[in-house]
Amino acid sequence: LFASLPGVSRASAGYTGGRTAKPTYRSVCNGDGHAESVQVEYDPERITYDELLEVFWKNHRPKASEKGQYRSSIWYHSEEQRLEAEASRQKHHAVRSTLVQPAVEWHPAEAHHQRAVSTTTTAAANDSCSCQ
């Protein structure tokens, strides 16, 4: 989904926000605190953070009841991104269902999860996005 957008150089599946130093899909499923996520690398001269957020919302249906690895999150890398993410979350009426959090260490997922990111039509992991 994100990888096909002009200005996006890479979209990778991974894990963030947990306690394990080297998370795996199994450790994430067993509750190590990580969320499944997609890290998006992009050229802000070609696509804006706000445009990425719009793609996120268009392809994501957050649920307030989702917890753990499937929690709905936007992980920001700067104060400017935080402000844009907060405004976007408000605009899309997702204040109670989607977290806006500072980016922490991100870990790439296993290879078969990477293939899913490049072929899916919905946000991989369906739940969180970290754009840098």
Image (cartoon, rainbow, N blue to C red):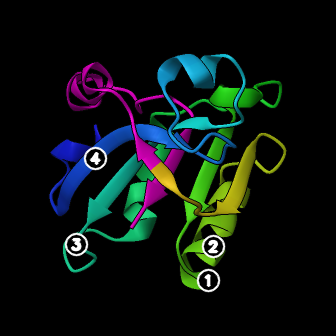
Q: Earlier in the sequence, mark 4 or mark 2?
A: 4
Residue identified by numbered label 1:
79
> Which residue is drawn at the image coordinates 72% and 24% (left, top)?
31
Q: Is residue 16 above or below residue 115?
A: below
Instruction: Kindly identify which numbered label has been placed on residue 43.
Output: 3
Q: Amino acid at mark 3?
A: Asp
Q: Are marks 4 and 2 in contact (CB under 8 Å)?
A: no
Quadrant for the N terminus, please: top left
Q: Is residue 127 above or below residue 92?
A: above
Q: Earlier in the sequence, mark 4 or mark 1?
A: 4
Q: Is residue 39 above or below residue 25?
A: below
Q: Picture coordinates of residue 113 (x, y %)?
A: 32, 24
Question: For numbered disc 3, what is the local secondary structure?
Answer: loop
Estimate how packed mark 4 is, as few (under 14), some (14 to 19) or many (20 or more) residues with alpha carbons within 10 Å. many
Question: For numbered disc 1, what is the local secondary structure?
Answer: helix
Q: Amino acid at mark 4?
A: Ala
Residue identified by numbered label 4:
11
Q: Amino acid at mark 1?
A: Glu
* 79 sits left or right of 44 in the view: right
Q: Nearer the viewer, residue 22 or 14?
A: 22
Estimate how packed mark 3 is, as few (under 14), some (14 to 19) or many (20 or more) residues with alpha carbons within 10 Å. few
Q: Nearer the viewer, mark 3 or mark 4?
A: 4
- Residue at the far front in the pictured view: 21
* 103 sits left or right of 115 in the view: right
> Which residue is drawn at the image coordinates 54% and 74% (left, top)?
81
